[in-house]
Amino acid sequence: MTKFKRILSLVLAIAFCFVFFCSVMFVAAESNHTCSGENCPICAQINFCKDLIRKVVYSFAGIFLALSLHFTIIKTVSNYKCFIENITLVSLNIKLSN
């Protein structure tokens, strides 16, 4: 089942990249078209592609921000954790005898 999931995720990633690349190429190719009026289907498709590109860029920026905050917090917590774990009675060689 793991091999199936790996192949499926690879196919989905390739399809996503293909759709993103086609959207960028369509916007670049049709940016100087002659508009037919208010309900121009090419303008509607260009707006859809621009919206798709904008959402993808914002989602990657959000993922990058979340991961950077996550690793920063993990690094900060691990520094404090190491500092707290080093101070124990055994590490200070304290004998508790009455």
Image (tube, helix red, strand yellow):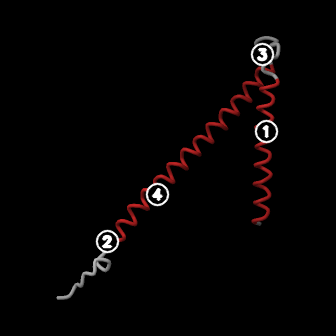
* Residue count near mark 4 (Cα–Cα under 10 Å), binned few <14, some 14–19, many ≥20: few
Mark 1–mark 4 Cα distance, whole angstroms, equals 37 Å
Query: In terms of secondary structure, where does tag 1 sit?
Result: helix
Give the amino acid at mark 3: Asn
Mark 1–mark 2 Cα distance, whole angstroms, equals 55 Å
Query: In terms of secondary structure, where does tag 3 sit?
Result: loop
Mark 1 or mark 2: which comes first in sequence? 1
Side (left or right) of 31 relative to 68: right
Mark 2–mark 3 Cα distance, whole angstroms, equals 72 Å
Mark 2 or mark 3: which comes first in sequence? 3
Side (left or right) of 6 relative to 60: right
- The residue singled out by tag 1 in the image is 19
Mark 4–mark 2 Cα distance, whole angstroms, equals 19 Å
Give the amino acid at mark 2: Ile
Side (left or right) of 6 relative to 79: right
- Tell us which disc is closer to us: 1 or 2: 2
Instruction: Identify the residue at horizontal 51%, vertical 52% (top origin).
Output: 70
